[in-house]
Image (cartoon, grey):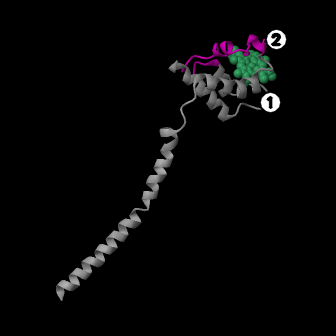
Amino acid sequence: MKNFILIVLLFTLGCQESSHSQSNNIPGIGDSGDKAAQTPGEQGEAPLTSDELFSMVNERVIQASCIRCHNSERPRAGIDLSTRELVDELIVAGDLEKSLLHEVIATGFMPPRGTPVSDENLLLLEEYILSLTAN
Ligand code: HEC
């Protein structure tokens, strides 16, 4: 009889334990959450090339916010941003701090009026500058 009670007790405890570990498995949801969080870095699309990044920067930053003052016809401060070569002259590959183009935007110096370059587009420019070391 004692043995029977003991077995029932152990069984009950066992069940509790396993149901316990089941509820502990709820963090298993956290596991898949982690996986989801890793997905963009691990198997996201291939990183954009410098060329792709440049055309995005050109469209969203240079053309949208700069070209009306820094064009080849009448470049303010002598700065012409109408070609990639000219834009790249204001960049030190891989070095945000030494890149004048980055500095004037990050500090809010440029554009001097109108809508400032968004954080998202500044990040895009940073990605472009950093991508240049890979080439
Ligand atoms: C409304 C006209 C205007 C717009 C738009 C504009 N700029 Fe300028 N930019 C100027 C003027 C004027 C100067 C000279 C300012 C000064 O020296 O005080 C200048 C100077 C600069 C300089 C030289 C800074 C230095 O320290 O030598 C850079 C680089 C520059 N602009 C980049 C840009 C970029 C990049 C954009 C777009 C995000 C932009 N500018 C938008 C008018 C403009």
Distance (Cα) linking label 2 and label 1:
21 Å
User: Considering the numbered disc 1 on the image, is that residue within a helix, a strand or a loop?
Assistant: loop
**Relative horizontal placement of residue 119, taking residue 6 as reference (left or right):** right
> Label 1: few (<14), some or many (≥20) within 10 Å?
few
In the drawing, what numbered circle is on residue 104?
none
Q: Which residue is mark 1?
A: 114
Q: Quadrant of the N terminus?
A: bottom left
Ligand 1, image quadrant it occupies: top right
| Corner quadrant of residue 10 | bottom left
Q: Position of residue 89 (x, y in %)?
A: 64, 12
- Name the residue located 57 percent from the left edge and 16 percent from the top edge: 92
Asked if disc 1 is less than 8 Å from ligand 1, the answer is: yes
- Name the residue located 68 percent from the left edge and 22 percent from the top edge: 104
Q: Tell us which disc is closer to us: 2 or 1.
A: 2
Q: Which residues are magenta?
A: 71-100
Is residue 87 rendered magenta in the image? Answer: yes
Q: Residue furthest bottom?
A: 1
User: Considering the numbered disc 2 on the image, is that residue within a helix, a strand or a loop?
Assistant: loop
Q: Position of residue 61 (x, y in %)?
A: 71, 26
Q: Which residue is mark 2?
A: 73
The amino acid type of the residue labelled 1 equals Gly
The amino acid type of the residue labelled 2 equals Glu
